[in-house]
Amino acid sequence: MRLPKTVAAGLAAVLLLGCGLLRPDEAGSAGPEPTFSVNPGGEPLDDTIEDAVPPSADLDAVFRPSFTTTEGEIDAGSGFLVRWPDGRVLLLTAHHLLGTAGGMSREYTGAELSGGVVTGMTAASVDDENIVIASNRMVDLPGAVSGDVDIRRDLAAFEVTDAAGAAVLELAESPPAPGDRVYLLAETDQPGSRIYPAVETARGSVPFLQFEYDDEVALKATSGAPVLNSDGRVVGINIGGDEGKSPVEGHANSIETFVPMLRKGLGQV
């Protein structure tokens, strides 16, 4: 299901900020406010939530991917490794990086990308450039699209046969509820921790993770990075955010929607 046009317009600039290809002052207006409400009941979120202890930021858990395509090498955004229930290791990232947001000439469908447009992927750890993973098998996700069309289908994945000693994250069993702590694990322009705490705020009809960061965060090049729960397990794939809001707002594709896509793409439906 496509998001309402007003939502898509608002997210288009947001996605670019998440990829880091535009500075906030270059992205222009984020467009009209979305038509959905994150709190349709009108009740405020619990302001008394206690600060949870952030999960540890495993070294070599975040990667900078480079994609070999029919348009040349595309370097954009972030990616991370997860362990699929059958033991396979996958690199997950955002589909929109393989489109105009990543410097390609047009938007591609998932079927086009896995059908020949993308022929390979390498990714280097942001903690140790000597740790590099590679894959020539992109998971077939025909329904994948950019997040400005549908955040729930903004997903790209590659099977990795050699994780080269890198950290492999685990998937959570359930998505966060409103008021739960979530954490962006990413390399940003800000020095210090790779962990950026936030609180999940989405309610009602919002079909993706939406959260408010505790502090200012520079979202440049964080599209495709993992969003974790307090146990350090993956609950989402970062798609972008709105640095113009206070507090800064983040958006992510939830495990509730991207895991079924992966299951189908891996032939497990």
Image (spheres, rainbow, N blue to C red):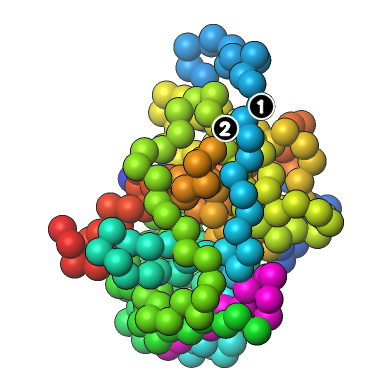
Q: Quadrant of residue 248?
A: top right
- Counting from the top left corner in percent of width and height, residue 237 is at 50, 53
N-terminal-most mark, 2 or 1:
1
Q: CA distance from mark 2 to mark 1?
A: 8 Å
Q: Is residue 39 magenta?
A: no
Disc 1 element: loop
- Counting from the top left corner in percent of width and height, residue 130 is at 65, 84
Could you tell me the amino acid type at mark 2? Arg
Q: Nearer the viewer, residue 34 or 54?
A: 54
Residue 181's mark?
2
**Can residue 66 be seen?**
no
Could you tell me the amino acid type at mark 1? Asp
Disc 2 element: strand
Which region of the structure is painted magenta? 118-129
**Residue 111 vs residue 24: left or right?**
left
Which image quadrant: the N terminus?
Answer: top left
- Counting from the top left corner in percent of width and height, residue 146 is at 48, 59
Q: Nearer the viewer, residue 128 or 259?
A: 128
Q: Which residue is rendered at x = 28% and y = 52% of the image?
A: 260
Q: Nearer the viewer, mark 2 or mark 1?
A: 1
The overriding secondary structure of the stretch rendered in magenta is strand
Please give the residue where the numbered disc 1 appears in the rendered image: 51
Q: Quadrant of residue 89?
A: bottom left
**Residue 205 vs residue 96: left or right?**
left
Looking at the image, residue 50 lies above or below residue 155 = above
